[in-house]
Amino acid sequence: MQKSSASLIAILATLFFSLTYSNQIFAEENTNDPKIKFLEKKLLEIIPTYKFDKIRKSPIGNIYEIVYGGEIIYITDDARFIIESGNLQEIIKNDEQNGYYFKNITELSAAEGRKNLLNSIPDSKLFVYGKSEKYFINVITDIDCPYCRKFHKDIQKYVDNGIKVRYLVFSVKTSTKKRVISAWCAKDRNNAFTLLKEEKSIDKQICKNPIEEHQKLISSIGVSSTPSMFLADGSLIEGYLSPEEVIQMIKN
């Protein structure tokens, strides 16, 4: 049976009152929450230039929301950790500089995982330039990527500075994969691969190869762009950097 207009109005009025009352209680709870006052003061100390709209309690016990426009950052009630863009970061005081810095715990864990994955594949299954055992870099590359070609033009600078470059090749398209396999099967593997980087043709060849293994490992690491460079500890360097910048990072 359809309810009368009067009954419907009464229901809506009750619902509106309930929601308004609940919001008032929530607002009062936030206003009277001493943790919010503490966090407001602490944030001004940690990030003086950060202008947030408000801080409010989250549904999780010791977690608060920092609201900035449409952006949300989470912070623990003791101001020791924040969660931003899916990354858990520890807030650490730097007494020497009288300031704070952030240690990305999520990235450190991810780097350890990447390191283990990359160490699981030996040089014998990669395109390798240089022979150093002390310094090396793992690079996810693509023969059709302009910045990957730019990186490869500098390959000799890395080798001359005692740094080994280990290439995993991203090749999803069948035509690209066939060319990469041809380079792998060539008598002079590195020269053939360099020719591909220079957009030159090489003889078509086929043999037993690890290129599909490259794809699985790249997928496991979760690479979203090329070139992606990984230091020995698994740290990620995205995009192109000059050889001088990368070499300094590797040796420091």
Image (cartoon, helix red, strand yellow):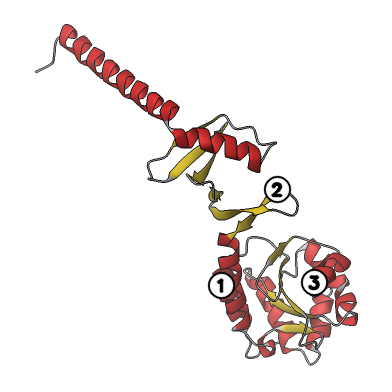
Furthest residue toward left: 1
Q: Which residue is mark 2?
A: 99
Return the disc, 3 or 1, that comes first in the chain's sequence: 1
User: Is residue 215 rendered to the left or right of residue 8?
Assistant: right
User: Is residue 96 rendered to the left or right of residue 61?
Assistant: right
Residue located at (65% from left, 72% from top): 234
Q: Identify the disc placed on residue 26.
A: none
Q: Dot 3: within a 10 Å radius of its alpha carbon, few (fewer than 14), some, or many (20 or more) residues?
A: few
- For numbered disc 3, what is the local secondary structure? loop
Q: CA distance from mark 2 to mark 1?
A: 31 Å
Q: Which residue is mark 1?
A: 113
Tell me if residue 191 comes above or below residue 77 in the rendering: below
Q: Nearer the viewer, residue 219 or 188?
A: 219
- For numbered disc 2, what is the local secondary structure? strand
Tell me if residue 28 comes above or below residue 197 in the rendering: above
Name which residue type carries label 2.
Gly
- For numbered disc 1, what is the local secondary structure? helix
At which x and y percent is residue 174? 63, 72
At which x and y percent is residue 53? 57, 29
Q: Is residue 108 visible?
A: yes
Nearer the camera: disc 2 or disc 1: 2
